[in-house]
Image: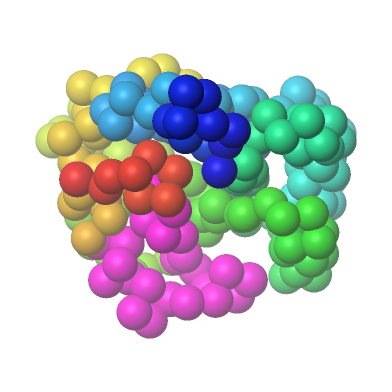
Amino acid sequence: MGRKRQNKPLKEIIGIYCEGTSEVEYFKMLRRKYRGSNVQAHQVGLKIESMDSMKGTKLITEIVDKTRPLKKKRQVNAVFAVFDRDDLTHTDIQRAQKLARANEIEIIFSSTNFEAWILLHFIYFSKAYTKLELNRKLSAPGRFNQNYARFKGAEYDKFLVDRVSTAISNARRLAITQTNLVTDDPFVNIQEHIKRIFGRED
């Protein structure tokens, strides 16, 4: 917990470090929804194109470097790394998990990519979709009603802010059978962390 001031404990400070802009915008939406001023969402300043198949580990390494001085000064209480499977191998993901555990970093993970979590705001599914299939489904009327691939990185509020509880419910249903971050597809685990981060999940 944070230090006390005038006998009142400060909110704990939580850092969320994201692979891409979609994840950053989504967590900013949640921060607005839950008014979590103690939560900071960052996009890690890495060049995606240079990360090759080890981007999961490189992402964690970058977060470790960024948060080590903050942890020493007790300026951050919890750290989350948000990334997708994309082209990572099982070995890549296991290495990222091991490095994250060693540095007390929680992984928020989506497979195939973050859009699997976004689609769960609209429907339940247990089939693995490709990136193109996910984009097509999210582009449909009644969802984003536009080319989702072009929309990515914009504000999610008007599309998703009232659907978060639906996504959590659908994700928990999916998690009954899809439990392995390394091997299962589809897989999401953001639903396990929303209450921990924001104090609410309604």
Looking at the image, can residue 139 be seen?
no
Q: Residue at x 42, y 50 (%)?
A: 196
**Residue at the spot 43% in from the left edge and 22% down from the top edge:** 37
Q: Is residue 181 above or below residue 10?
A: below
Colour scheme used in the picture? rainbow
The outermost residue toward the bottom is 177
Name the image quarter holding residue 197.
top left
49 displayed left or right of 117: right
Q: Residue at point 57% right, 36% down?
A: 2
| Quadrant in the picture for the N terminus | top right
**Would you say residue 129 sits in the magenta stretch?**
no
Viewer-side residue, 48 vs 95: 95
Write down the region rendered in magenta: 170-194
Residue shown at 38% from the left, 28% from the top = 36
Location of residue 191 in the rendering, given as x and y in whole percent from the top left corner: 37, 56
Residue 141 lies, in percent from the top left, at 16, 33
Tell whether position 180 is magenta: yes
Q: Where, quadrant-wise, is the C terminus in this rendering?
A: top left
Q: Residue furthest front?
A: 7
Instruction: Report the side of 17 relative to 201 (left or right).
Output: right
The location of residue 172, given as percent across then percent down, is 30, 67
